[in-house]
Image: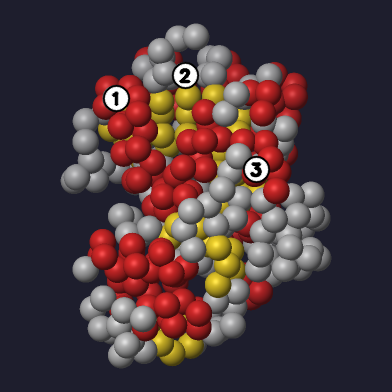
């Protein structure tokens, strides 16, 4: 096997920011190339400005740098996606096709494609959403993830391309901000709480959703990508769970640190998306196949978030 050289597409995003750092720790700075549409002022060396909708540009980066692994994180998320459904479909699918096709042509050894709990719709058991549940999403983002999972599976079966994927719940971390998602409230709430600002929540108090703390999300990604090939039985995308809670429960956990913390509820169009998603994800396959186990619950996450944001 050749020396691992990683390309992260969408490295400025919520997950990309933290994942890039972790991958640099493991593989070394010179073996991790980060890329996005624009360079951040704080971005380190080895950043390439890359528009992943441009096939030739992706191909050039892969060939020139002898890339062996791609983490393709660029996408328009659920809430932003509903504001421009066709453009969302175009971007999410085009970038994935470019990554899959360049990887096939240039024999990239491993590809990571993030899917989401948004692949599920109203016709599943929301209290125990199984890996094999029906996939009839309510958002165009969810539709692009369902299609993406099937394309990942197709490239694996037809061409032997080693594509791996996780269905992320809402990801919560202090290092970076999400953008355009339905679960974003669960990050902003901490930023407002530490500033003593009353939080205006765009979801109703009892809206339970699956979430995961950033450290668990990163660890799940790396564990999946490092697992021996024969342990990966699912080539669409794995359900993974961290914890499940609603805004009211989250506010109560923040009140343990800030007793005066206040929250009000003004549900908007994102309520409809959230209502169509599962409440509790069943991740038995990930646990059985590559020993997945989350470490953070709501209490520990709140403590860690507040300590780091203060
Ligand atoms: C979103 O809210 O759109 C994302 C997701 C759950 O995929 N965080």
Q: Nearer the viewer, mark 3 or mark 1?
A: 3
Can you tell which mark lies on residue 286? Answer: 3
Please say if the residues under marks 3 and 1 sit with CB atoms less than 8 Å apart.
no
| Quarter of the view holding residue 2 | top left
Judging by the rendered image, the residue that carries numbered circle 1 is: 28
Judging by the rendered image, the residue that carries numbered circle 2 is: 68
- Calculate the distance from the C-alpha at mark 1 to the C-alpha at mark 2: 14 Å
Q: Is residue 124 above or below residue 159?
A: below
Mark 3 vs mark 1: which is more N-terminal?
A: 1
Residue 283 location in percent, x, y?
67, 51
Mark 1 vs mark 2: which is more N-terminal?
A: 1
Callout 2 crowding tier (Cα within 10 Å): few <14, some 14–19, many ≥20 = many
Residue lying at 69% horizontally and 69% vertically, measured from the top left: 276
Residue 279 location in percent, x, y?
65, 68
Residue lying at 60% horizontally and 19% vertically, measured from the top left: 104
Residue 183 location in percent, x, y?
50, 66
Q: Secondary structure at mark 3?
A: helix
């Amino acid at each position: 096997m050749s020396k691992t050289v990683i390309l992260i597409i969408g490295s400025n995003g919520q997950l990309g920011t933290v994942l890039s750092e972790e991958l640099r720790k493991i593989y070394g700075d010179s073996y991790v190339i980060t890329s996005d549409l624009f360079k951040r002022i704080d971005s380190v060396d080895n950043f390439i400005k890359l528009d992943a909708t441009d096939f030739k540009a992706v191909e050039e980066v892969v060939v020139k740098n002898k890339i062996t692994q791609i983490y393709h994180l660029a996408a328009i998320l659920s809430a932003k996606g509903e504001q421009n459904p066709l453009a969302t479909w175009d971007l999410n699918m085009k970038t994935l096709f470019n990554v899959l096709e360049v990887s096939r042509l240039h024999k990239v050894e491993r590809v990571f494609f993030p899917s989401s709990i948004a692949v599920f719709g109203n016709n599943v058991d929301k209290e125990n959403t199984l890996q094999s549940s029906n996939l009839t999403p309510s958002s165009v983002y969810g539709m692009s993830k369902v299609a993406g999972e099937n394309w990942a599976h197709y490239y694996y079966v037809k061409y032997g391309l080693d594509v791996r994927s996780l269905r992320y719940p809402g990801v919560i971390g202090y290092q970076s901000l999400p953008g355009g998602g339905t679960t974003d409230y669960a990050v902003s709430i901490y930023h407002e709480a530490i500033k003593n600002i009353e939080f205006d929540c765009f979801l109703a108090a009892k809206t339970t959703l699956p979430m995961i703390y950033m450290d668990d999300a990163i660890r799940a990604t790396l564990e999946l990508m490092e697992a021996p090939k024969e342990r990966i039985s699912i080539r669409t995308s794995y359900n993974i769970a961290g914890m499940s809670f609603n805004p009211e429960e989250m506010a109560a956990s923040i009140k343990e640190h800030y007793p005066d913390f206040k929250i009000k509820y003004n549900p908007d169009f994102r309520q409809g998306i959230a209502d169509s998603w599962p409440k509790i994800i069943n991740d038995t396959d990930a646990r059985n196949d590559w020993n997945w186990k989350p470490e953070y619950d709501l209490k520990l996450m709140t403590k860690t978030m507040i300590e780091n944001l203060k």
